[in-house]
Amino acid sequence: RELSAAGHKLYGIEFDPEWAAAAQQYYCEPIQVGDLDTMEPRFPDSFFDVLIFGAVLEHFKCPERILRRLSRCLKPGGKLLVTMPNVANWFIHLHLLFGRWDYQDRGILDRTHLKFYTWKTFKQLLADSGFCVTHSEIGPIPLPLVFSWMAPGKPFYFCHVINNAISNLRRPFFAFEFIVVAERSTR
């Protein structure tokens, strides 16, 4: 919605036809419906300035193959923007200490995730796909989404502020998700 409102021309690929129809109101072009693990997207070579994979690569059987295939669509100097959940997050470690690996409807252990990545394995996925990270940030655990009493204006919002600050101290351990900008490798 924000990118569309800012005047960017958007293209999308969605597996679920109903979700594609719902998202179409924010897109400039028709959304292609299909499974990126098996389909060949209909985009010309050197077409995009940026490819965005927002929390989607972990849902595919072969994300490295998808990244390699779509890299042809990037213009020279084009960027890849990817977010990836961090399976090495402290919350997952804590649950593992108690023998728990419970899939959920959303989050790091979303039951539709086929792959799980740490910071190291995420960077390796990108390298194996022909990309190198040029910028990285982290997203902390979104405590206000989990606990409504930690939302802005609520009594325990300070917990979210502290969590956000701590998350940047030891990024691979505290990050809920990794956010990277990458470019095609020159090697």
Image (spheres, rainbow, N blue to C red):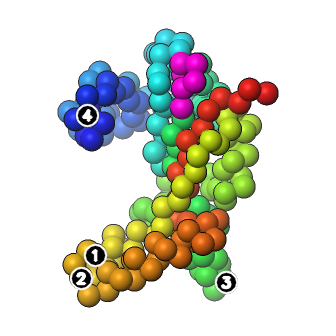
Q: Can see residue 23?
A: no
Q: Quadrant of the C terminus?
A: top right
Which of the 4 quarters of the picture holds residue 60?
top right
On residue 102, the disc is none
User: How far separated are the C-alphas under marks 3 and 4?
Assistant: 46 Å
Determine the residue positioned at 61% across, 81% down.
94
User: How far separated are the C-alphas under marks 1 and 2?
Assistant: 5 Å
Determine the residue positioned at 47% across, 16% down.
47
On residue 97, the disc is 3
Main secondary-structure element of the magenta-colored stretch: strand
> Is there CB contact under 8 Å for labels 4 and 2?
no
User: How far separated are the C-alphas under marks 4 and 1?
Assistant: 28 Å
User: How far separated are the C-alphas under marks 2 and 3?
Assistant: 31 Å
Mark 4 vs 1, N-terminal side:
4
Task: Choose mark 2 or mark 3, whichever is in front.
Answer: 2
Segment colored magenta: 74-79
> Is there CB contact under 8 Å for labels 2 and 3?
no
> Is there CB contact under 8 Å for labels 1 and 2?
yes
Of residues 111 and 85, the one drawn nearer to the viewer in this rendering = 85
